[in-house]
Image: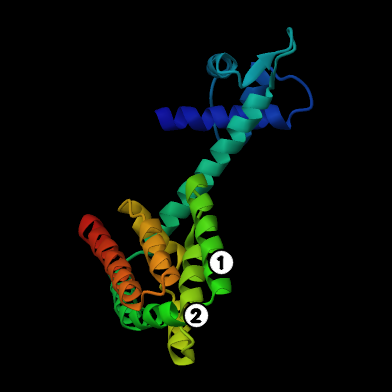
Amino acid sequence: MRKKLQEKEIAVLEALKAAESPMGSWILVEKLEEKGHYVSSATVGRILSRLEKRGFAEKCGNNGRVITQMGIEALSNSKIRDHLNEQTQTLEQMISTTVLEDYITVLQARKAIERETARLAAENITQEELDAIEKILEEQREKHKKGDSVAHCDISFHRAIAKASRNKVLETLYLMLFSYGQQTNIFEHVRKQVNAIYMTSHVEIFEALKNHDAELAEKCMLKHIDSLIEDVTKYWDLFY
């Protein structure tokens, strides 16, 4: 019942927004019918009253009501939430045990490759490359605060380390694994569902690189990849 009420409120706000002049209950009844919502004038009146109390609509004398700026913002936010919910549902539908198995397989391969790229990067990385990685971490931190996707930063971080290793074979192998599809929106979704945060792991790896500590860089990378495998396994146990 609550969901239907919300849908009708959205329909009323959309009609008010599209209107060039104030609208009353009877006209709104017709507008809602066009969208498949069959309600009485009294019901629309109650919806308008609730919207008005929340500051989303306001009266214009006896001519009806118009949408307010708050109403426009509320409508926009509702559409954004709906879009995000649709994306989440799509991602969940795409995830299967086969997908999770593939992720674990790729992560195991990454573990073998990236322990070496981290070790070599600690030995060969330049100050310019360290500065570039630090900027990547800053961008990741900002995106995380805003709730934005950090998948791109994750890819850039690991790619920069692979390049700094000065081993073209290992770098190519990492890029092959990336193109295979391990770093995707689906993988990020999986990790969010288990409340995983890997910013700390990235910072630990960066500090080891900055200190040119090859042994510690390898250890931190192994810890990081193991945590990713654990996250996927945890998601599997929770939802399958």
Q: Is 119 on the left-hand or right-hand side of 84?
A: left
**SS category of the residue bearing label 1:** helix
Residue 110 percent coordinates (x, y): 35, 79
Give me the disc on residue 164: 2
Name the amino acid type tagged 2.
Ala
Which class describes the residues within 10 Å of circle 2: few (<14), some (14-19), or many (20+)?
A: many
Q: Answer above or below: position of 171 versus 101.
A: below
Q: Give whichever of 172, 43 is nearer the camera.
A: 172
Q: Which residue is mark 1?
A: 131
Quadrant of res 187? bottom left
Quadrant of res 1? top left
Residue 167 percent coordinates (x, y): 46, 89
**SS category of the residue bearing label 2:** helix
Q: Give whichever of 196, 235 is nearer the camera.
A: 196
Mark positioned earlier in the residue sequence (2 or 1): 1
Q: Quadrant of the C terminus?
A: bottom left
Distance CA(mark 2)–CA(mark 1):
12 Å
Q: Is 147 on the left-hand or right-hand side of 34?
A: left
Can residue 35 be seen by looking at this rendering? no
Give me the disc on residue 140: none
Q: Answer above or below: position of 223 versus 33.
A: below
Residue 135 percent coordinates (x, y): 56, 61
Q: Answer above or below: position of 8 versus 107.
A: above
Q: Give whichever of 117, 86 is nearer the camera.
A: 117
Can residue 51 be seen by looking at this rendering? yes
Q: Residue furthest right?
A: 20
